[in-house]
């Protein structure tokens, strides 16, 4: 069934391995549901979701500090607005491709559907490398990008947010340019600074939400976070805030990592150690020389999965955890895996964990906290009432618990929960109902 479906997808998609991997995984789970519901089958729901509504491509021309003209390429993939305005992040990275953005936009449709909020799916980015650029250069690039993108976004059309290398500073420059170009003040972007309409807890949301989801997974096993040895990959916002929340809830976080190696603390990282990692990251420095007072050591060219964790949280990038690494986790007796990054496991790694009976929560469910708080930011902007950090945190926890309940309901079989199956089916049902009921558009 899956092979037949994939053979009918536009041939260009097969040359996009990240998108193809995401589509194949979803198709395998949801095509039986589509076939069983004549209205979904007639509407060809999954095929329509596999073809983005539009892919916008922009030339971005700007001037560097030396007065030289620089030219970059940017894209915005607007995948589906069947349940709400397009919503998804922007990333700045020299390796950004249409393939990556198309896969992320497709996944974003499912992730946003799981939150229960009225948000469609999109993703965008530019092959701009901010490393070594001055604040003035980054500002000029953001303004040039917005001059191209402004007509395609807005509070009821498409609401971008931050992603890799796009934080509060970049969102500020982008929003300032949009406000001037549109002569309007509305929720056209999220992840804004608190001084001009941002939400409390937005930076922490994805990492905190990941831990709230993991707590639900453990509760299904009659366990808590206390004493659990947790390996986390990455050292960005998601990884470090997940580490901080896990420590607060009694977990023993034994690793954070970078492309150069892994910071390992056999007795667990302290909040002071996590803050030190954040400071190194902000300064563009490595974490290969930790102070002895932190009780941690740096292991070059080692991955977090080599340190026998009870819980594995890949929070770095797609396809970072391979089959061999999954074997390490299985042999170490790892109890569960939850994805803080988007599609961080290769297909064969995910298949191995499934054969070993190790629960794995896909990113579309486990890391939905960021977009959930983005949705709350849109609501706060619309109503002009801003929530405290505690109020946002409670709302985030409730959303993640609700997502877990929806996923568990669809994925429970033979006393176990197939989290990937449950997440794909729960999200698909919401999307399919909306698409079928709105006709052929």
Image (tube, rainbow, N blue to C red):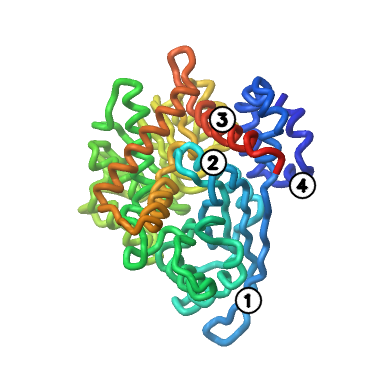
Left or right relative to 230: residue 349: right
Q: Find residue 346 and report its horizontal and vertical position in percent.
A: 57, 37
Q: Find residue 227 and report its horizontal and vertical position in percent.
A: 25, 32
Q: Residues within 10 Å of mark 2 (few under 14, many from 20)?
A: many
Q: CA distance from mark 2 to mark 4?
A: 21 Å
Left or right relative to 70: residue 160: left
Q: CA distance from mark 2 to mark 1?
A: 32 Å
Q: Which residue is mark 1?
A: 61
| Viewer-proximal residue among 65 and 232 | 65
Left or right relative to 438: residue 230: left
Q: Which residue is mark 4?
A: 12
Q: CA distance from mark 1 to mark 3?
A: 42 Å
Q: Which residue is mark 2?
A: 343
Task: Give the mark nearer the N terminus: 4 vs 3.
Answer: 4
In front: mark 2 or mark 4?
A: 4
Up/down of 427 relative to 260, above or below: above
Q: Secondary structure at mark 4?
A: helix
Check whether the beta carbons of the residues at disc 4 and disc 3 lie within 8 A of each other: no
| Viewer-proximal residue among 204 and 190 | 190
Q: Which residue is mark 3?
A: 429
Task: Report the number of numbered marks.
Answer: 4
């Amino acid at each position: 069934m899956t092979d037949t479906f994939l053979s009918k997808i536009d041939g260009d998609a097969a040359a996009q391995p990240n998108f193809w991997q995401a589509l194949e995984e979803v198709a395998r789970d949801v095509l039986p549901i589509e076939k069983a519901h004549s209205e979904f089958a007639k509407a060809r729901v999954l095929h329509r979701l596999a073809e983005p509504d539009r892919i916008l491509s922009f030339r971005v021309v700007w001037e560097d500090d030396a007065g030289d003209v620089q030219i970059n390429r940017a894209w915005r993939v607007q995948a589906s607005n069947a349940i709400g305005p397009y919503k998804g992040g922007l990333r700045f990275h020299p390796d950004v491709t249409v393939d990556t953005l198309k896969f992320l936009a497709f996944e974003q449709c499912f992730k946003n559907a799981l939150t229960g909020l009225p948000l469609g799916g999109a993703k965008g980015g530019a092959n701009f490398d901010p490393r070594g650029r001055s604040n003035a250069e980054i500002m000029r690039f953001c303004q040039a990008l917005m001059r191209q993108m402004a007509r395609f976004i807005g509070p009821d059309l498409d609401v971008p947010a931050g992603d890799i290398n796009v934080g509060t500073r970049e969102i500020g420059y982008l929003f300032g340019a949009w406000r001037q170009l549109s002569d309007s003040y509305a929720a056209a972007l999220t992840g804004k600074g608190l001084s001009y309409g941002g939400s409390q807890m937005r930076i922490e949301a994805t990492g905190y939400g990941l831990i709230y989801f993991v707590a639900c997974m453990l509760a299904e096993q009659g366990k808590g976070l206390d004493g659990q040895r947790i390996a986390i990959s990455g050292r960005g916002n998601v990884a470090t805030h997940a580490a901080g929340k896990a420590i607060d809830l009694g977990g023993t976080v034994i690793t954070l990592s970078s492309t150069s190696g892994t910071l390992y603390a056999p007795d667990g990282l302290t909040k002071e150690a996590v803050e030190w990692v954040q400071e190194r990251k902000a300064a563009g420095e490595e974490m290969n020389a930790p102070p002895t007072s932190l009780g941690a050591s740096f292991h070059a060219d080692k991955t977090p999965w080599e340190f026998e964790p009870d819980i594995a949280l890949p929070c770095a990038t797609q396809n970072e955890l391979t089959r061999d690494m999954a074997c390490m986790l299985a042999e170490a007796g790892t109890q569960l895996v939850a994805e803080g990054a988007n599609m961080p496991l290769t297909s064969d790694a995910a298949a191995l964990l499934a054969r070993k009976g190790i629960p794995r929560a896909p990113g579309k469910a486990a890391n939905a906290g960021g977009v959930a708080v983005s949705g709350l930011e849109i609501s706060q902007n619309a109503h002009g009432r801003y929530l405290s950090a505690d109020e946002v945190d409670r709302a985030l926890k409730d959303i993640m618990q609700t997502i877990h309940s929806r996923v568990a309901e669809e994925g429970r079989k033979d006393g176990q929960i197939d989290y990937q199956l449950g997440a794909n089916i729960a999200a698909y049902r919401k999307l399919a109902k909306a698409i079928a009921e709105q006709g052929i558009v």
